[in-house]
Amino acid sequence: MTRTVDEGPGDLDTPSAFATLTDLVGDGEVVILSGAGLSTESGIPDYRGETGRQRRAEPMTYQTFVGSAAARRRYWARSHLGWRHVARAVPNAGHRAVTELQARGLVAGIITQNVDGLQQAAGAHSVIELHGSLDRVVCLDCGRRTARQVLYRRLNEANPGWSAQVTEINPDGDAVLPDDRIEAFEVVPCADCGGVLKPDVIFFGENVPPARVRQCYALTEDANVLLVLGSSLTVLSGFRFVRRASELDIPVVIINHGVTRGHDHAFLTFDAPLGPTLTTLVRSLGP
């Protein structure tokens, strides 16, 4: 049976629930599955609000990206400006708390659905990037991967004097721009083979590499507890690990704003802010 706590740990009406969380994490072998909600306190928006409803902006799909040069132009123009916002973001208290739990030897693995690299920037290691990373670019023709900063310089050189007024930053570094500025943007090909460049992330409609999925399943199946942080679990790529843990009677604990797709599979849920909650959790475990 799921136990739900609606406030942060400082205001719990049922402190025993937080004590249970502390005991579970203190026993170690925790596998963390993090989502966009862990990064919102760093100023990076997510696609779904606290109620899990889709925001106005629709994400780029793989099929649209590979099937349309105009769509690729739109993506790279918007992302060229929006990526700077992601690149400037810094880890928040939630990221630092996860890193501290790992440093104490309590975390067996970290699976992140985020593409911002903030968990690694906070000092965590061996993070499985389920959906890839915006820091890298891959050529769809020759397969070569390069640093995003290299592409950023090439796009600047190909678009001298180009600028646009950013009206909104969407998830994954996608900036809302006027159509006329998008049409004036010049996309560059792979420097090696002239092929199509794509951010090294999993777009909607694209499959996560099978080996990566198997690695995440293996971690989940060996866990003492699966701790879900800031994910609505709407997308199957993350939800399947919650479902697998539930099948194996591995406790699933969810800390998130709003109800998630995984609530029916959870042993314990907290509707609470990630940074303060995780910071309190670390403190509750002692020095």
Image: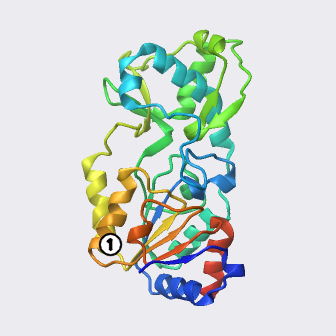
The residue lying at 50 percent from left, 86 percent from top is 26
Q: Is residue 208 left or right of residue 234?
A: left
Q: Is residue 109 above or below residue 140?
A: below
User: Which image quarter is the N terminus in?
Assistant: bottom left
Dot 1: element:
helix
Q: Is residue 135 left or right of residue 7?
A: left
The residue lying at 32 percent from left, 30 percent from top is 143
User: Which image quarter is the C terminus in?
Assistant: bottom right
- Nearest the camera: 7 or 128? 7
Instruction: Estimate how packed mark 1 is, as few (under 14), some (14 to 19) or many (20 or more) residues with alpha carbons within 10 Å.
Output: some
Q: Is residue 215 above or below residue 155?
A: below
> Three-letter amino acid code at disc 1?
Ser
Q: Is residue 205 above or below residue 160?
A: below
Residue 244 is situated, as x and y percent measured from the top left of the image, at 29, 67
- Quadrant for residue 281, please give it: bottom right
Residue 86 is situated, as x and y percent measured from the top left of the image, at 63, 41
Residue 234 is situated, as x and y percent measured from the top left of the image, at 43, 52
Q: Is residue 101 left or right of residue 237?
A: right
| Residue highlighted by disc 1 | 246
The residue lying at 57 percent from left, 33 percent from top is 149
What is the total number of numbered labels drawn onto the structure image?
A: 1
- Nearest the camera: 284 or 194? 284
Image coloring type: rainbow
- Nearest the camera: 193 or 45? 45
Q: Is residue 151 left or right of residue 213?
A: right
- Quadrant for residue 4, please give it: bottom right
The residue lying at 57 percent from left, 90 percent from top is 16
